[in-house]
Image (cartoon, rainbow, N blue to C red):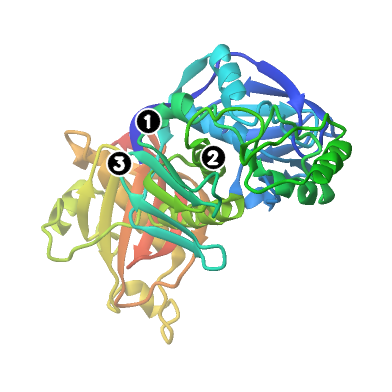
Amino acid sequence: MSLNVKQTTIKKTTTLSGVGLHTGVEVTLAFMPAPENHGIKFQRVDLPGQPIINADVDNVTDLSRGTTLEQNGGKVATVEHVMASLAGLEIDNCMVQINAEETPIMDGSARFFIKALKEAGIEQQDADREYFTLPQNIYYHENDRSVEMIAMPLDDYRLTVMVDYNSPVLGSQHASITSLKEFETDIASCRTFCFLHELEMLYNNNLIRGGDLNNAIVIVDRVIEDDELDHLAKMFNKPKVEIKKEGILNSDLRFHNEPARHKLLDLIGDLALIGTPIKAQIMAARPGHAANVAFGKKIKALIKKTKANINVPKYDPGKEPLYNINQISSMLPHKYPFLMVDKVMEMGKNHVVAVKNVTMNEPFFQGHFPGNPVMPGVLIIEAMAQAGGVLILSQVEDPENYNTYFMKIDNAKFKEKVLPGDTLVFRLDLIGPIRRGVCIMKGAAFVGDKMVCEAELMAQVAKK
């Protein structure tokens, strides 16, 4: 739904460079302004054809210690910090150009991306931002990893993360924000982290080639033998570090719960791949990239299902109509047997909901499959157009002095048969303003919750 908040992009292109955490490759990334309704897209400018990759959960192909997108022959890895930065600043439209396979890790947080975007400036656009407010709770869980996630309806966006690593250093932690306005100050600077004893495993799996004490928190949660430190120093070609006790190897934490806050940063970035800003209360216990993306896919599926049904009109036969058959007959030029609308139930400035009761007494059933009666599709379109005609003629003082004429029908689709005994409910929406008596409408016909027909109609209203 629209809350009359406008979409945003950035005012100018801004670039930054660094090294990929897992590839170790030097990379330059550019944030670029983008038009309304563009969304967030990545572009691999180093590949032939410069393929574009939509920032979409359905394009996630790898979740090995980061989130990787792949589309059109291009791949971009470790996108979560970039996505979190754009989401945290509520930037709707941006092209992210990149000249390597992985985004730069910078210092392991989102603060350098935030800084670059803020320096570029945020520009308001004309189009409304479309939010999705959850109509119901959505649950996700993984029993083997004790992951639990829930999204609950709320007229805002709040997130809480709880983590427990069974570590004497980290212990149990939680972090939360009550608004994305807190992201820049409370979350953006929180760095990624790993345990020292994981480093060799990650390295042997062709990961963290760009890892450094300057771009990640390294946690020492057990005694590390001296020969193991020699081995790690040789493997990474780095000076040997000295460890005297358990704790944080490289520096002080920026927040006492920085690891939990970074997990919240990752969650925001991964959920931004839903592609629609949501209004919800999110609570996540022990989240990770795989769970975040699976959870995001569940939310996206609900959005898709809800949008498909968003304009299904609800018909209450006991409700008094706005226009009954006699009023409709005096307004439209059509008469029996070609008057196809029985009631108008709802009307706004740009939409109308009308009803046609289909009975076996319709004259067309005598010749249209009399042994297997089916309402002709062209007459469903005609009834739909008449409903739109009521909307247009209701806006003139003397509708009886006007006629309506079809000019064009586009994208007509017939999805279900309409049979005697069905009640057809039409919804027509104006696509644009009426100019010189010409109107264009998007129309749909329903029997119950099922759409049976849809089409785009153009008609002209002319004085007799």
Location of the C terminus by quadrant is top left
Horizontal side of 284 relative to 204 (left or right) equals left
Q: How many marks?
A: 3
**Residue placed under numbered mark 2 in the picture:** 259
Question: Would you say the residues marked 1 and 2 are in contact, meaning their CB atoms lie under 8 Å apart?
Answer: no
Residue 321: horizontal and vertical position, in percent?
14, 56
Q: Can residue 7 be seen here? A: no
**Residue placed under numbered mark 1 in the picture:** 433
Residue type marked 2: Pro
Q: How far, Cα to Cα, is label 1 from label 3?
A: 31 Å
Is 100 situated above or below 291? above
Residue at screen point 61% across, 24% down? 113
Location of the N terminus by quadrant is top left
Residue type marked 1: Pro
Q: Nearer the viewer, residue 285 or 443?
A: 285
Q: Nearer the viewer, residue 227 or 322?
A: 227
Task: Categorize mark 2 by other alpha carbons within 10 Å: few (<14), some (14-19), many (20+).
Answer: many
Disc 3, SS? loop
Residue 167: horizontal and vertical position, in percent?
56, 51
Horizontal side of 112 relative to 280 (left or right) equals right
Horizontal side of 118 relative to 104 (left or right) equals left
Residue type marked 3: Asp
